Image: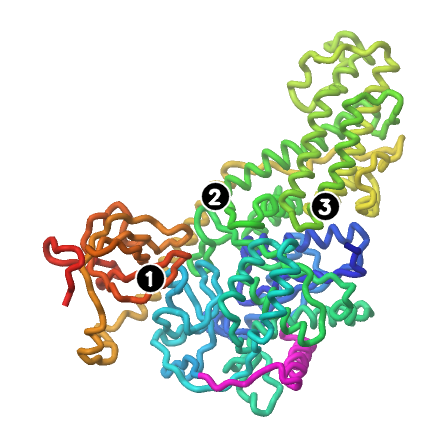
Amino acid sequence: MNQPKRYLITSALPYANGLKHVGHLAGAYIPADIYVRYLRARKRDVVFVCGSDEHGTAIPIQAAKEGTTPRAIIDKYHEAIKQDFEDLGMSFDIYHRTSEPIHHETAQEFFTYLNDRGELEVKETEQFYDEEAKSFLADRYIKGTCPNCGSDRAFGDQCENCGRTLSPDELINPVSTLSGSAPVKKKTSHWYLPLGKHEAFLREWILKEHKDDWRANVVGQCKSWIEGGLQSRAISRDLDWGIEVPLPEGKGKVLYVWFDAPIGYISATKQWAIDNNKDWKPYWYDADTKLVHFVGKDNIVFHAIIFPVMLKLHGNILPANVPANEFLNLEGDKMSTSRNWKLDMRDYITDFVKKENGGVQCADMLRYYLTQIAPETKDSEFMWKGFQDAVNSELVSIFGNFINRTWVLMHKLCGGKVPKLHEELLDETDKELIADIANAKVKVENLLEEFKFREALFEVIDLSRKGNQYMQKKEPWIVARQLTSPNPSQGGALIPASATELSDSKNPPLEGREAAQKNIDNTMHLCLQLSANLAILINPFLPNTAKKMIGMMKVVEKMLDWENAGKIKLLGVGYALRAPELLFRKIEDDEIKFQIEKLKAGMKKAEGEGQKEEGKNPKPSTIDLKPSIQFDDFAKIDLKVGTILAAEKVEKADKLLKLSVDLGFETRTIVSGIALHFKPEEIVGKQVVVVANLAPRKMRGIESNGMILMAEDKDGKLHFVNPDGIINNGAPVN
């Protein structure tokens, strides 16, 4: 494949409605930054754009919570998020805002272009309306139960629990987040993007052209959407916060945030071009540009289906890849802002980067761990103990240890200068290390090109591990004794980096001082050249560490150019190097204990505040009955007695149990959202009342054939509705 002439790299625009946590960082920002830094090291023409997403219902919702205006919210959180990204080493070429005039103009032009060419359609539909608030409800103003996983943390656009993209009509028991009441349907007109017209294009482009080079999770989610039937997608909303629809008949309506937000990549590129006296158009219109979107899995559909259709219709290039990551969980549970079970970037920066004994090395330590556990193919877990182990056992004990030993020995054995390489005396161990250095460059390069950042980082650390093994085999501190005194106690032995290096060498002593010195020269020369290579290879991942390393080497940043990797003549013979500095510090047990206690306390506080909020708005003592029905309506329901034969938890669904229920005439599989109230082993053998003629419905991939009747008490606890005494399975309930 030919090398592209230029690259445009994007990271998903974060909502400017609050601080962002490390799950966001691991999903869309660190991977993109690694890739961009690698491309820059290869001297590629690359622009890295991102910015705050400042429209949509999330903004006014947060403004209402904080008792302020949407404008105040976006101004506050734009600056906060931008600063957090800077503190953790994100190297955006521009971090823009969708509230800027250039973005409004760009988004409106995009809409007008599609509308004028008949690519949009206008539909009058019934949409949810809150009669108390007297307002149409955008997706985020509607909450209910997810039809996929049974979670009650589902909104009209997406389930917070399983991440599935939803529409308001799919929610079970929807309520308005404005008033808490059930919304009604009311007619309104909106503009739609008819995705169904582009099914053939999407099948060819995604399922054929990119089925092998895109990640399986991305292709799989796109396939599921396409196979499920592509529906027209509304691209306008009845809101007063956002970009106005640029038509007279669009008065009072704004562009849907998921239409305007990805266009933010284009407007950010325009602003970057203005700031740098460049032409922005080749980055969005020239086929010789490689466009790559880095997102989390909840954004796959928008970046791999909806936005590409928009781009195609607008005449722009299409993304070459959408390397989406799965979700990052925290200490055994899903990250949740509402439950305060999260680790904000700001909290880490405060507790580690900005703290005494912190600094940029701590920023790199987080980058390292998040890359090591990156959810590239499946959900992964941030564990504070895992963070400690990764830093102490790998960064400190392997990578940092090799660099420190090399510098200490170089100053003691070589006068602080790069010794000569005596090529005629290179042995098999030396040649093996030289080959490892060259091979590591190729491996890391190939893995980065394929967006396999975890594996690429492993290869870099593994190369430093090989450096430690090489040094142990060569034992230059033992060889040095021949240059001083046969008795180390007379002051001839140097102080090694570890006590084990004082033990007797397994290698036979070399004959003569000259041979011994050449042996030391070769060992230290190769260790120093390996150190220089490690600086180049680690730079995309840990840029502050690479900068510190070249400072110790007294070389300019140009040495970090990728073309220098794999070589063993990077540091000139006789060149004086600075004194050693520790690259990383250890993470202490009390720091980890503090973080875990802080996490638990934060969730407990959030739960307490939630209970107080409920106390302010007690449930009414009267019950609102559903509309009256006729007897014939009730007679359609077929209720049967059944016995639960088996029960088990549904994987990755906190609330769901998979039940096997004996109805007498057959055994049914029923998925029920009762896992928070009953343990599986507690309910086996219980008789229950089942709605036996309910249409089958899939939940978490399991077909559920029926519904168990439950009663809910005043405290929200569920109870089985079961017969009095033992009744034959299959008996009708009238």
- Callout 3: 10 Å neighbours few (<14), some, many (20+)? few
Q: Amino acid at mark 3?
A: Asn
Q: Amino acid at mark 1?
A: Gln
Q: Assess whether residue 110 is covered by the magenta stretch.
A: yes
**Of pointers 2 and 1, the one earlier in the residue sequence:** 2
Residue 363 position in % (x across, y down): 63, 48
Q: In percent of the image, x 79 and y 22: which residue is there?
A: 428
Badge 2 is on which residue? Answer: 594
Residue 151, visible in the rendered structure? no
Q: Amino acid at mark 2?
A: Phe
Badge 1 is on which residue? Answer: 611
Q: How far separated are the C-alphas under marks 1 and 3?
A: 53 Å
Badge 3 is on which residue? Answer: 446
Q: In percent of the image, x 46 and y 71: which residue is there?
A: 167
Q: Is residue 244 left or right of residue 532?
A: left
Q: How far separated are the C-alphas under marks 3 and 2?
A: 40 Å
**Of pointers 3 and 2, the one earlier in the residue sequence:** 3
